[in-house]
């Protein structure tokens, strides 16, 4: 298969070297490797263009003279071929390399490796001494993350099966917009093509493989889409007042407002903290049992009491 | 690593990346070059032989890329057209952007210079790909680096560890053995001198890590004798959240009783009885323990003690 590789490299060189557009017939005549009937050369060339595009190499199509409908010509603009972050310092190289290293052994290690090669090829020694010892790690092996990111960057729609709260698989089809990682989970954002709303999906709740649908470039990301505001939960913030046994319920304590640790009861602190999802909040407070007593909000308190009564009745 | 046949496309990418790399590393040894590109020397020689056949149309020696590597050291000439480093693909930029997010969170306060550098790189990258990826790490990269060093240099660590089960932050001396993964969470397997036994520590719960000079020799990683607690329960509602909480495989849920609305009976296991009690407290509204009885009694006692405080007037205003 080295013939194909050779042809792709030669095509890249020819299209990069030319200052003007070169026509298909010129390519077939001069670039090594185009053989066979006119039709098969044509097919070869179309496939080669797609293959190069998949490597991030954009072939520009134009004509010699805009006033006439000439035969189309092709070239690769050096600007769209070469490293696009401009001049980088040795410190920046270190940071970029360290960032890519985070993916070693993880879901996107292929892209990380090719990125690292390019960074090293710049030929600036990384200034690792100036960087503290850091070892970031993207702890995810889920292949769906790579499929999702590739679909986002190429603007290709995807479909998958998603487990709902009843653990029933539901078919979803979305235009994927973004990914985030929070609290150790990865989320996929996109326009749900059935509900026509932005939805988020936890990656590990996708059952089976994410499948690309249709062609790349089949949608645009909505200009109104703002990841920073969306990645926060849609639920509104509510305030809670809780008694915490002194020295206990550490996770709740670490989220509480600093101003709020005094209580009339010896051995207890009265703290204030915010939550969004009431159900999750109740479950978290119950985790700490008799070390955390919710005072407010009243409806959460009532819910907790109801559940404790159920527990006493059932197991007591 | 399993050897994979390289596709012509991947090979093309590698050849295009080889040219600028060799250009900036003239005279690099075949061995080092193969290592850099994560391929065998045979594959590299095949790459170089292919590259040798490439050049500008005409393909006379004047136009062909000129490589020499017979001596075991590689140098390149006549490759000006390809010598610029290729642009980063969008996927590569996303990968880097997420990695930079991870780094950003772990910088100490006195390294504002690095924070500024990272922010400006992220801005540059996002102007190219848009704001399509954000990450907040759960593990501190600086602590992780110290753990890796301890593993490599076989040294002991002093860690400050937050155990959610015990609801305690403790300082422990441990001899690290290996990093692993437990259901998507990175963990450190270590011998804990404080507890006199092998323990697994979630990296996201390591609050501090300090390298010690001392080291212990741990003969064998063996911990098979640790007790496992089992319980059977019925999950009636909030199935997905509850399955995730008890770390159950969701494909266990393909049960016919589900559709009849009777809930689903599952077995849950843990090394810690306390973990089970706390989880059953959290899920009082969704789960019902069927066995063992002593676990049900413990949850009942916990619920009663908690309820008493709620009924106590001192805790109602």
Image (cartoon, rainbow, N blue to C red):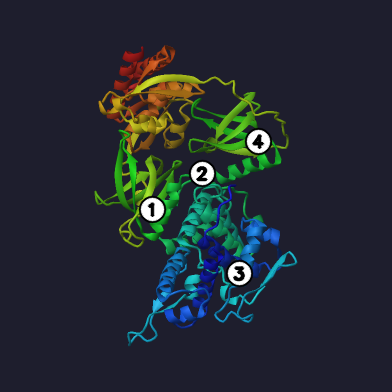
Measured in 3D between alpha carbons, the distance from the residue under mark 3 to the one under mark 1, in whole angstroms, is 38 Å
Note whether residue A126 is visible: no
Pointer 1 and pointer 4 on the same chain: no
Residue at image x 44%, y 73%?
A41
> In x, y percent, where is residue B43?
63, 59
Above or below, A206 against B112 in this view is above
| Mark in front: 1 vs 4 | 1
Question: Real-space Cα distance between discs 1 and 4?
Answer: 38 Å
Residue at mark 4: B157
Chain of the residue where label 4 is placed in the rendered structure: B
- The residue that disc 3 covers is B51
Q: CA distance from mark 3 to mark 4?
A: 49 Å
Q: Which comes before the other along the chain, label 2 or label 1?
A: 2
Residues indicated by labels 2 and 1 sit on the same polypeptide chain: yes
Q: CA distance from mark 2 to mark 1?
A: 18 Å
Q: Nearer the viewer, residue B36 or A138?
A: B36
């Amino acid at each position: 298969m080295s013939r194909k590789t050779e042809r792709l490299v030669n095509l890249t060189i020819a299209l990069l070297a030319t200052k003007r557009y070169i026509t298909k017939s010129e390519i077939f005549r001069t670039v090594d490797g185009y053989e066979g009937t006119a039709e098969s050369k044509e097919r070869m060339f179309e496939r080669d263009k797609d293959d190069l595009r998949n490597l991030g190499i954009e072939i520009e199509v134009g004509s010699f003279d805009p006033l006439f409908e000439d035969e189309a010509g092709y070239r690769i603009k050096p600007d769209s071929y070469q490293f696009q972050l401009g001049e980088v310092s040795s410190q920046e190289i270190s940071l970029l390399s360290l960032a890519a290293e985070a993916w070693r052994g993880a879901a996107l290690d292929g892209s990380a490796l090719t990125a690292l090669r390019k960074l090293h090829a710049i030929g600036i020694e990384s200034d690792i001494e100036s960087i503290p010892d850091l070892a970031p790690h993207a702890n995810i092996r889920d292949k769906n993350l790579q499929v999702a990111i590739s679909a986002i960057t190429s603007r290709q729609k995807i479909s998958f099966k998603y487990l709902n709260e009843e653990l029933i698989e539901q078919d979803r089809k979305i235009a994927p917009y973004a990914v985030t990682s929070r609290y150790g989970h990865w989320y996929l954002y996109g326009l749900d093509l059935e509900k026509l709303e932005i939805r988020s999906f936890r990656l590990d709740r996708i059952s089976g493989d994410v499948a690309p649908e249709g062609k790349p470039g089949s949608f645009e990301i909505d200009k109104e889409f703002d990841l920073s505001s969306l990645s926060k939960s849609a639920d509104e913030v509510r305030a809670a007042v809780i008694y915490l046994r002194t020295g206990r319920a550490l996770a709740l304590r670490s989220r509480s407002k600093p101003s709020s640790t005094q209580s009339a009861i010896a051995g207890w602190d009265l703290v204030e903290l915010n939550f969004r999802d009431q159900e999750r909040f109740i479950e978290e407070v119950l985790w700490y049992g008799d070390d955390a007593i919710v005072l407010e909000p009243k409806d959460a308190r009532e819910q907790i009491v109801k559940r404790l009564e159920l527990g006493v009745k059932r197991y007591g | 690593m399993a050897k994979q046949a390289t596709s012509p496309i991947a090979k093309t990418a590698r050849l295009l990346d080889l040219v600028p790399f060799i250009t900036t590393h003239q005279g690099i040894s075949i061995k080092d070059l193969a290592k850099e590109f994560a391929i065998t020397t045979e594959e590299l020689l095949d790459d170089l032989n292919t590259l040798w056949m490439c050049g500008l149309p005409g393909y006379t020696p004047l136009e062909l890329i000129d490589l020499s590597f017979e001596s075991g050291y590689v140098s390149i000439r006549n490759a000006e057209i390809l010598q610029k480093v290729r642009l980063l693909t969008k996927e590569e930029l996303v990968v880097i952007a997420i990695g930079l997010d991870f780094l950003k969170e772990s910088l100490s306060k006195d390294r504002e210079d690095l924070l500024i550098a990272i922010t400006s790189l992220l801005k540059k990258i996002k102007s190219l790909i848009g704001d399509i990826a954000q990450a907040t790490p759960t593990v501190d990269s600086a602590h992780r680096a110290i753990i890796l060093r301890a593993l490599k240099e076989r040294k002991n660590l002093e860690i400050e560890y937050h155990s959610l089960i015990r609801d305690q932050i403790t300082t422990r001396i441990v001899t690290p053995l290996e990093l692993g993964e437990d259901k998507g969470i990175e963990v450190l397997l270590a011998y804990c001198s404080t507890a006199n036994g092998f323990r697994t520590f979630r990296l996201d719960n390591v609050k501090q890590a300090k390298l010690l000079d001392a080291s212990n020799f741990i003969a064998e990683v063996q911990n098979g004798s640790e007790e496992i607690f089992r319980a059977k329960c019925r999950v009636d509602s909030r199935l997905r959240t509850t399955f995730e909480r008890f770390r159950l495989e969701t494909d266990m849920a393909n049960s016919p009783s589900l559709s009849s609305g009777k809930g689903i009976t599952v077995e849950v296991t843990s090394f810690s009885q306390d973990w089970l009690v706390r989880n059953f407290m959290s899920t009082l509204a969704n789960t019902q323990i069927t066995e063992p009885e002593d676990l049900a009694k413990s949850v009942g006692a916990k619920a009663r003690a908690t309820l008493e405080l709620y009924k106590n007037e001192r805790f109602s205003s």
